[in-house]
Image: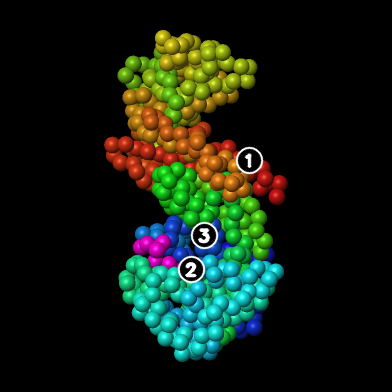
Amino acid sequence: MLNEEKPLNFIEEIIEEDLRKGTHDGRVLTRFPPEPNGYLHIGHAKSICLNFGLGIKYNGKTNLRFDDTNPVTEETEYVESIKRDIQWLGFQWEEELYTSDYFETLYEYAVNLIKKGLAYVDSSTSEEIAAAKGTPTEPGKPTPDRSRSIEENLSLFQAMREGKYKDGEKVLRAKIDLASPNMHLRDPIIYRIKHAHHHRTGNDWCIYPMYDFAHGQSDSIEKITHSICTVEFIPHRPLYDWLIEELEIFPSRQYEFARLNLTYTVMSKRRLLQLVNEGHVESWDDPRMPTISGLRRRGYTPASIRDFCERIGVQKRENMIDVGLLEFCIREDLNKTALRRMAVLDPIKLIITNYPEGQVEELIGENNPEAENGGGSRIIPFSKELWIERDDFMEEPPKKFFRLGPGLSARLKHGYIVQCHDYVKDEQGKVTEVHCTYVPTSKSGEDTSGLKVKGTIHWVSVPHAKEAEVRLYDRLFNDEDPMAAEDFKSSINPNSLTAIEKAYIEPDLVHAEAGTGYQFIRLGYFTLDTSSNSDKLVFNRTVTLKDSWAKEIKKG
């Protein structure tokens, strides 16, 4: 949640001033108003944390309102995913509302504007309307229908509602100021015809309010005290205020903050949908996607995302946030919570030649040495034959290589010190086996050997190992700002996913659960994928262990 010890951001300053003055009778009611036309992404998480966080901090409330005014793009699937994401992040709305709840009221508001001579039905084409609006340096010109009588406009608008016209044949426009320097005030369209099935109202309506008309009025109906939007809506605020004033309804106020821009990331729902539809990713919850569901499937935690949103703060000016900060936040969280386990992704066999044949030991491994309660421990089977990482052996090791090679010694994690004395190659010259001897008195926690080694490697017992697919995810885009390219898809990273079909894991990991974080020792943080089943375990890498951002945090 928001940290009270931090300086107030500018929205908190506004709220505290309103509370001091007794504005809105000391109430704080915010809202999160997504359009259900796609899955939420990390940018929405910033808005969720801000709106719900303000409600919590000031003992207020937050509504969830779906801006469902475009039946062509909206689906119940998206509604359910949005609710799931908000709750997963740790928040609960006061009321679940829909702009479609207000369709009749909004229609009456439009009728009131017509009766006041402040709205008219226009039969011009979209091209004609756009041309008549003028340019930022030239005033607009009235279309022939701007002078229609109030009676004719009321009749035509009623006919629009009754479905007597085709899509695009007529629109309702507010009559404001064709010479305004703000293009949004040059008689904006406030209703259009769409003969399409709505996910909630079915075919009851064939005219739908535009966002600029529905937004402020819905805020007013709900008596929202602080309507918080992103900065691209600053030019829309005069229209927001004009409509509320002319309709003489509850005076909700709009405030704007900088949206989230993240390096190596695309944040447009339209373009994310394009990635899904064109098969560049598997789905909306593909772990490479910046969607909340994608981050969840990849192994990000609600706490890490809330921490990220708090760290980036709330500003008025947009800037680019380094995705490394998001990765830092999940490492910080998982370091304290993730269970430690061993897995071998690129295996070669290590044979301990002097270990008793058929003997199995039960070694003790810590679950998480960073956990506040000590984290507990687990039993790890140990035997004569182990899988180790291919990178942990070199035929001709350089001077500062502290793992295994001819004559070199290293400690097996939680186990013994071993020394390499031989290795075996196949016909292609590839090393297939490493032969070592172990020191029986060097067992971790009971070491009396007096030997010192600099390297520790992880392993999995061959007869006890379980197989799993491990998916290594990298950034989906190669360019820091994919949207700067003429075609953002040209920046797609062809190596954003590497699937290891046959990795070996500790037997304890057969009980892994999706949503639980694991540190594969020396390899990174992983979680069980939602596609896993008893026949095939699949693990996703959440993030690597390397963290360049930790140094930046210390500098700051």
State the image quarter where residue 167 is shown.
Answer: bottom left
Report the disc number at residue 246: none
Give residue 187's position: percent from left, percent from top. 57, 77
Q: Secondary structure at mark 3?
A: helix
Q: Is residue 160 magenta?
A: no
Q: CA distance from mark 3 to mark 2?
A: 10 Å
User: Horizontal placement of 379 versus 126: left or right?
Assistant: left
Please tell me whether mark 1 or mark 2 is closer to you in this view: 2
Tell me what residue is drawn at x 40 percent, y 63 percent.
Answer: 72
Q: CA distance from mark 3 to mark 1?
A: 26 Å
Which comes sooner in the sequence, label 3 or label 1? 3
Tell me what residue is drawn at x 41 percent, y 27 percent.
Answer: 460
Q: Cβ–Cβ below 8 Å for labels 1 and 2?
A: no
Q: Name the amino acid type tagged 1.
A: Ser
Which comes sooner in the sequence, label 1 or label 2? 2
261 is higher (above) or lower (below) than 59: above
Q: Secondary structure at mark 2?
A: loop
Disc 3: which residue: 44
Work out which residue is located at the far left of the displayed protein and give it: 535
Disc 2: which residue: 33
Q: Which residues are magenta?
A: 66-76
Work out which residue is located at the far front of the displayed protein and give it: 144
Q: Is residue 70 magenta?
A: yes
